[in-house]
Structures are given as structure tokens and as C-alpha cells.
Amino acid sequence: MKLKREKKSFIIPTNSMSDVAFLLLIFIMLVSLINYRKEVKIDYPEAEDAKKVSDKKNLEIWVDKSGKLYLDGVLSAFSAIEAGIVDAYRKAPETRVHIIADRDTAFENVQQVLGVLQILQYRVVSFVVKDK
């Protein structure tokens, strides 16, 4: 017994192509927002003579006026800051550590971070200030 095979023609529907393009555009816009750096609201100290450095390969340590520590914008414990510095140094020794402290921060809070950097003999450190 012979079976007849019917040939079906396939058609790609193009009615919804604009919808797919619109959804793809929204997806790309949302994914690009994920890469923004997190910042902590602080009052930057001022400096008369400031030097601009590269903004690539930086590890940012924020210290707010109450003494809370943030690693790349995320609230962290002191041990996590220390581990983050060690990890950044292992991955890329030329990574620059930026210490961003509020102008009203007690120096003891900044000294904790500097003590860790000193123990690790970290030599690429910058203090971020506002230019006058």
C-alpha cells in the first residue's frame, strides 16, 4: 500500500518582526544598564593639586562619614575589603586602589584600609578628591 506524501510549503510569518525587534531593543537597553558602577553618596574632600589617573583597572574602596566601608559600591565588612584587595592584586598586580572617603570621615576609618594596604605592600593607591 502506497502512502501519498503531501508537500507542504512553509511560510515564515513576518507580521511580528517589528515586535521581536522592539523586544530585542528593550533587552539590550536593560542589559546595558547593569554595567553602571555603584556609588556611595559622600562629600568629596578638596585638593589644590590633583593628578588625574586612568579609570581602568581600579578597585574602589568607599568610606562614608559614619565609617562604613564599601567595596566597589557594595557595603562590605572589613574582612571582605581585605579579601577584595588580595583578590584584585592576585588577578592583576597593576590594579589601582582608589580610596574615596567623605570629608567628614574620621581618619581612623581610613587608617584601617591604609593599614591593610601597608601590610600587603600595595604601592598603587590613590585618594580621590574633588578638584578646586
Image (tube, rainbow, N blue to C red):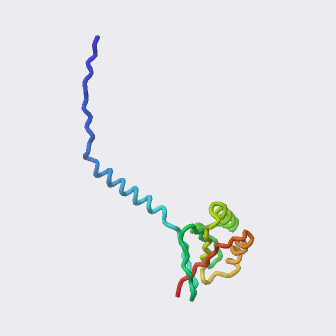
Q: Residue at x 42, y 59 (%)?
A: 30
Q: Residue furthest top?
A: 1
Q: Residue at x 60, y 73 (%)?
A: 98
When the figure is inspected, residue 110 is found, relative to residue 71, above or below; the finding is below
Q: Left or right: where does residue 118 sit relative to residue 51?
A: right
Quadrant housing residue 115: bottom right
Q: Left or right: where does residue 67 sit relative to residue 49?
A: right
Front residue of 109/121: it is 121
Front residue of 132/79: it is 132
Front residue of 10/107: it is 10
Q: Residue furthest right?
A: 119
Quadrant housing residue 94: bottom right
Q: Left or right: where does residue 13 sit relative to residue 60?
A: left
Q: Residue at x 58, y 66 (%)?
A: 74
Q: How many discs appear? A: 0
**In the rendering, at what x and y percent does residue 36 appear?**
48, 66
Q: Which quadrant, please, contains the N terminus? A: top left
**In the rendering, at what x and y percent does residue 25 appear?**
36, 57
When the figure is inspected, residue 106 is found, relative to residue 73, above or below; the finding is below
Q: Residue at x 64, y 77 (%)?
A: 66
**In the rendering, at what x and y percent does residue 13 appear?**
26, 42
